[in-house]
Amino acid sequence: TQLLEQSPQFLSIQEGENLTVYCNSSSVFSSLQWYRQEPGEGPVLLVTVVTGGEVKKLKRLTFQFGDARKDSSLHITAAQPGDTGLYLCAGETGTASKLTFGTGTRLQVTL
Amino acid sequence: DAGVIQSPRHEVTEMGQEVTLRCKPISGHNSLFWYRQTMMRGLELLIYFNNNVPIDDSGMPEDRFSAKMPNASFSTLKIQPSEPRDSAVYFCASSFESEAFFGQGTRLTVV
């Protein structure tokens, strides 16, 4: 079983603070995706990283794929209340696009 | 496109009853996934189909769970008989290459 551990599990911060969420596995993935899920909704894709060492930026969000393609991080700069949600990483094995999801990080940003 | 459509959105049933969850994937997508999400276990892959064929059902908890995909535009997940521990949010997702698009989920409560 491929396990993706995310840390921290919960994070409560104030608006304007920076934070980093980690996603770690002992398995190698062909790609890694980050999703955000809001209450009552399904997860929505934020980004896909494919190449080891790859860094992608999406406004205030920076995503990095580890060199060995086993881990990833999500960094948010100057968090805003709209960033509140459940952040999920998901590793793809390349077999018919099967995704294995991480344990999730629940982020709350307060004013 | 309306996205992935799941029905019903909410289902409350008594223990021992049969429950059928329905999913209409996005037209043109060739992979379909059923996930279950709980606070304790996070998002778990139950089964996925590629071109209507079940590829991996190793996540299906036990024989009480079954899934079908009779055509490219429809899939069902059936639980018979249902038990209180089956209470969770069940998500259907579809994809064409790697990005998975999720439905809004069915919140199942078995009492």
Image (cartoon, coloured by chain):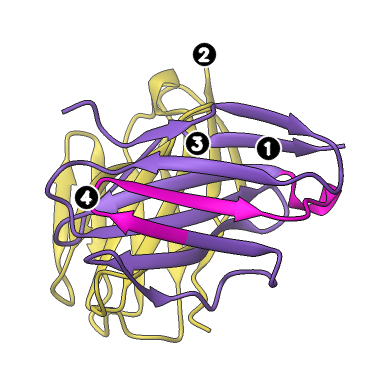
Q: Name the residue under label 3.
A: B105
| Label 4–label 1 contact, CB within 8 A | no
| Residue at 43% over, 34% down | B6
Residue stretch rendered in magenta on the structure: B68-87
Q: Is B63 located above or below residue A109 in the figure? A: below
- Which chain hosts label 2? A
Judged from the image, the secondary structure of the residue bearing numbered disc 2 is loop
Q: What element carries label 3?
A: loop
Q: Are marks 3 and 4 in contact (CB under 8 Å)?
A: no
Amino acid under disc 4: Val
Q: Tell me the kind of residue under disc 2.
A: Leu
- Nearest to the observer: residue B15 or residue B3: B15
Quarter of the image holding residue A22?
bottom left
**Cα–Cα span, label 4 and label 1:** 30 Å
Q: Name the disc covering residue A47, or none.
A: 4
* Identity, as a three-letter code, of the amino acid under mark 1: Leu
**Label 2 sits on residue:** A111
Question: Callout 1: 10 Å neighbours few (<14), some, many (20+)?
Answer: many
Query: Mark 1 sits on what residue?
Result: B108
Do marks 2 and 4 both belong to one polypeptide chain?
A: yes
Quarter that holds the N terminus of chain B = top left
Relative to residue B72, is residue B23 drawn left or right? Answer: right
Establish if B33 lies above or below B92.
Answer: below
Chain shown in purple: B
- The amino acid type found where label 3 is placed reads Gly
Q: Earlier in the sequence, mark 2 or mark 4?
A: 4
Q: Does the magenta stretch include residue B82?
A: yes
State the image coordinates of residue A44 (x, y, percent, origin top left).
Answer: 33, 39
Disc 2 versus disc 1: nearer the observer? 1
